[in-house]
Image: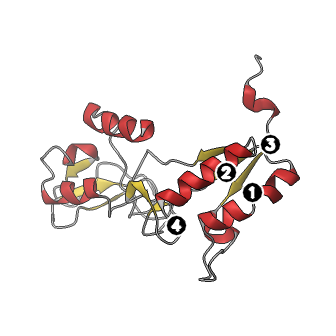
Amino acid sequence: MQRKWWHEKVAYQIYPKSFYDSNGDGIGDIRGIIEKLDYLKELGVDIVWLSPCYVSPLADQGYDIADYYNIDPRFGTLADMDELIAEAKKRDMGIVMDLVVNHCSDEHEWFKKACEDPEGPYGKYFYIVTVQDGKLPCNWRSYFGGPVWDKLPGHEDKYYLHVFHKKQPDLNWENPALREEIYKMINW
């Protein structure tokens, strides 16, 4: 096996909501992580792995992302994130963002547009099927319980796939337009 740069590094995962509250509102935040960087470095941490801190309704602890381009205000701002990255770099520490791209939140703009027009371009960002006589395409079970298919809001005969929580519609990676949107966001 060829050794990679990260093989010698120590990573520490932080769930921002419960890590350190810098402003006394009862919710951990990015500023709290910044305040604890020296402590983490002293412990030997080389890489801080952040659980999702993007805008989310938190149906699944932030893994249901409603906006890939913004930090959830509960945790801070994009400026706070920029400062965290800069301060970590000063300490020779890396930041790894936990990024979910197999599904998004049902509150994401893409899914809202898919609900408005399931046959339109955003409808193809998801797995949406027409169901007749209540016969679902398969009998798979969601990791959260129940079937992986739920009615598409506003459509009695259409269902969408969600392998996890029903607020986490699966993204259709077979769609080149969706892939390009994800790649654009990752590169951002």
Q: Earlier in the sequence, mark 2 or mark 3?
A: 3
Q: Amino acid at mark 4?
A: Gly
Q: Kindly identify which residue carries mark 4.
A: 76
**Distance Cα–Cα, label 4 vs label 2:** 15 Å
* Residue lying at the far bottom of the rendered structure: 25
Q: Earlier in the sequence, mark 4 or mark 2?
A: 4
Q: Are marks 1 and 3 in contact (CB under 8 Å)?
A: no
What's under tag 1, amino acid-wise?
Leu
Quadrant of the drawing holding the C terminus: top left
Answer whether labels 4 and 1 touch (C-beta < 8 Å): no
Task: Identify the residue under disc 3.
Answer: 10
Q: Tags 4 and 3 in contact by the CB under 8 Å rule? A: no
Q: Position of residue 58 (x, y in %)?
A: 48, 68
Local crowd size for mark 4, using a 10 Å CA cut-off: few (<14), some (14–19), many (≥20) = some
Q: Quadrant of residue 65 in the image?
A: bottom left
Q: Which residue is mark 2?
A: 87
Residue 147 x/y as whole percent: 39, 60
Q: List the residue tagged with mark 1.
A: 37
In this picture, residue 95 sits left or right of residue 80: right
**Of marks 1 and 3, which one's residue comes earlier in the chain?**
3
At x 62%, y 48%, the residue is 86
Q: Mark 4 or 1 closer to N-term?
A: 1
